[in-house]
Every structure is written in C-alpha cells, then in structure tokens.
Image: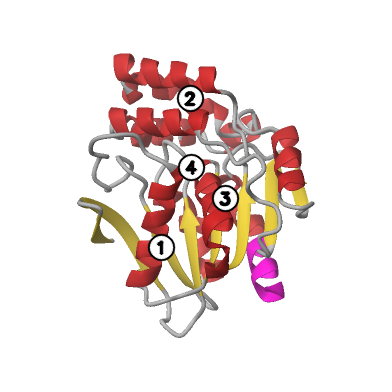
Amino acid sequence: MAFINIQGRSVAYRLLGAEANPLVILAHPLGMSQAVWDDLLPALLPRYRVLTWDLPGHGASQAWGEGPITPADLAREALALAERAGVERFHFAGTSIGGVVGQQLISEHGERLLSATLTNTGAVIGNAELWTTRAGRVRQEGLAAMAEEIVPRWFAPACFEAEPALKAGWCTQMGRGDDESYARLCEMLGRDVFTGRLSGKGVRVQLLGGSEDLATPPATLEALAAECDGAPLEILDGVGHVPSVEVPLLLAERLLSLFRQA
C-alpha cells in the first residue's frame, strides 16, 4: 500500500500490475475498503494495471477535514490517482458509493473514461431522510455499534451461510472507520443525485445489480439505466450489494468482457 496527499489529506492506495497495461480504477462501497477488490486481482492483473484506494475515513485513508464531501471531491481523488499512475484515460468500476464516483466522472470527465462499470448503485439511492437519519445515528452511536445492523444488508443470506465469518469480519472493518467521514458521505448520498446528468456523455457504460440487494434493488438500477441512455443492465441472481465479494470471478468476467469491447 502507498499514500498520496490530495487536498491536504493522506489517501491510501494500491497500484498493481505492469506499467504498460491499460489502467483500471476501482472504487469501493460505503463502510468497506479497497480490500473488496482483492479476489478480482488474479483475473485482472495479467492484462491490466489496477488502482484501488480507500475513501475518506475508510481503510487507511485519513479522515475528512472541514465541510461537506461532494461527488466532485471523490472524483478528484480518482483523477489525482490516475495522474500518479501517469495515465490520461482509464477504465473505471465502482460499487455503491463507488458507483456514484463513477457517475460524477461520466457527468464531468467522460473524456477520461475508456469505460465505466457501475454496480449496485443509482442516480438516486434511497432518500434524503434515510441518509440524514443514518448520519445522525452514526454521530451519536458510532460505526462500531451500528455495524451489526448495516453489514447484513450488504450480502445475500446464502453468502453468510457459505462464509460464517464474513459478517464478523466486515463488522470489524466497518467499526474501525471514522464516524464523521462516514456521516458526511451519508449526507452526500442524500443531497447529491444524478438525475438528468448522465445522458449523451459518449461513455461506454455497463450496469450490474443483485437480485437480493436491499440497498440498491433492481428498480434502482433500472432507473439508472434509463438515465444512462439505456445502458445495458444485468441483474445477478442470488447476489446482494457487493458482487466483488460474493461472486468475484463472475464480476471479473463481466469487467474483462467490457474492457475488450472498449
């Protein structure tokens, strides 16, 4: 793992693979870390250079400073990391809030994207009241106390049955995050939406969702597909909110297919 200073904050990232290969940037879901991509690396690295990073207050990245967090702030991190890699154009894939970062890139920086894969996300995710309530609870109770409630919503029930330690592991990871950074990201999701901002951008977009996803159900992905000029959408059967953990080989297969087409 390496670190870079972006807007006065230390940001943790990994840049793996041969420098000559095309770059893929991956953005993780809220409450998790760049470790969600680990099981995809064996499939991606033979052909691509892969860059992952931790969002503010997540993993090993420093907590956010003063003021609100915006999608533009998070996209700026992705672009700064692409610059660190010495690359002008790149493939992007993001899940949940990582997909929101992708929408910001599509909206304002489409010329930088070779392709964009958005999974388990939406132009609108939930509603402002939901996110404001969660932000308030996180500030009062803390992530460690709320993890037992939130983490089970990430995965299909069959995933927990197959991997009994999965819940405890991600509860531990989530509980180590910065409460205030998480709360501000919640407020961002309730405030900043992408309705009417994604059409006509000329970016090759692929959308993926999960049939068992409680946070961004298939209807949310269908609405996003309409915003993206009818971008192709696949709903993965029996999958919850984090396909990179639940079905990494299948997700890697879908990414590689799109990269080849692009």
Q: Which residue is mark 2?
A: 150
Q: Which residue type does callout 4 highlight?
A: Pro
Q: Secondary structure at mark 4?
A: loop
Q: Kindly report the distance in space between the C-alpha atoms of the residues bearing marks 4 and 2.
A: 12 Å
- Residue 189 pos. (x, y %): 50, 33
Q: Which residue type does callout 2 highlight?
A: Ile
Mark drawn on residue 173? none
Q: Which residue is mark 4?
A: 29
- The first of marks 3 and 1 along the sequence is 1
Q: Which residues are magenta?
A: 253-262
Q: Nearer the viewer, mark 4 or mark 2?
A: 4
- The first of marks 3 and 4 along the sequence is 4
- The first of marks 2 and 3 along the sequence is 3
- Residue 233 pos. (x, y %): 76, 50
Mark drawn on residue 103? 3
Q: Which residue type does callout 1 highlight?
A: Leu
Quarter holding residue 96: top right
Q: Which residue is mark 1?
A: 79
Farthest bottom residue?
20
Q: Main secondary structure of the magenta part?
A: helix
